[in-house]
Amino acid sequence: MIEYKKAKLSDIVSMQNLVSPEVESGIILDRSDDEIATNIRSYTLALDDGKLIGFCALHVHAPSLAEIRSLIIKEEYRGKGVGTGLINKVIDEGVGLGLQKILSLTYEKEFFEKLGFVEIPKESIPEHKIWADCIKCKHFPVCNEVSLIKNL
């Protein structure tokens, strides 16, 4: 049975090990151990029998807007509902925080659409998001990611 829980600082090494192939391929942005530690409260983990199989972060940009970041699922668990479970957990967290919208920049448009996200023009994303994160990406400024948003 899959368990979802908030990350702890002691989880950072396992998190980095899980995400490193996707970082190397440019699918997910590189985050340093220090950056993860600073934002540790935003991460939710998926565990199977105590072993890390996935995680994502809910990064708050403004009182009304957050972003789902760094969604990663161990390859053998993909397509089994783990990602949906993680997204639902962070959506519930966003509702509890009083957010109005959650943003996602992704290559997995259909996955997010199934969860109620709607595609929006990238130009409508807050500027601080583009310059704070996108500029670090190896694909910047030519990006194939799709921006989607979900109203809560």
Image (cartoon, rainbow, N blue to C red):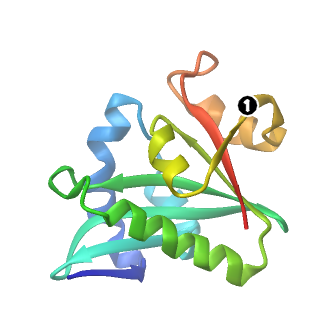
Q: Residue at 32% across / 72% down in the picture?
A: 46
Tag 1: amino acid: Lys
- Relative image position of residue 13 (x, y in whole percent): 29, 64
Task: Choose top left, top right, bottom left or bottom right for residue 146.
Answer: top right
Q: Is residue 1 above or below residue 99?
A: below
- Relative image position of residue 84 (x, y in whole percent): 41, 63
Can residue 25 be seen from the camera position used here? yes
Q: Residue at 30% across / 45% down in the picture?
A: 20
The residue at which mark 1 appears reads as: 122
Judged left or right of residue 40, residue 75 is left
How busy is the neighbourhood of tag 1: few (under 14 within 10 Å), some, or many (20 plus)? Answer: few
Q: Residue at 69% across / 84% down in the picture?
A: 96
Q: Residue at 24% across / 61% down in the picture?
A: 80
Nearest the camera: 32 or 46?
A: 46
Judged left or right of residue 29, residue 100 is right
Nearest the camera: 64 or 137?
A: 64
Task: Choose top left, top right, bottom left or bottom right for residue 65.
Answer: bottom right
Task: Choose top left, top right, bottom left or bottom right for residue 93.
Answer: bottom right
Q: Is residue 61 above or below residue 119?
A: below
- Relative image position of residue 2 (x, y in whole percent): 25, 78
Residue reaching furthest to the top: 142
Q: Is residue 109 above or below residue 144?
A: below
The quarter of the picture where the C terminus appears is: bottom right
- Relative image position of residue 8 (x, y in whole percent): 41, 80
What kind of element bears circle 1? Answer: helix
Can residue 29 be seen from the camera position used here? no
Judged left or right of residue 83, residue 151 is right
Nearest the camera: 109 or 145?
A: 109
The quarter of the picture where the N terminus appears is: bottom left
> How many numbered circles does the render carry?
1
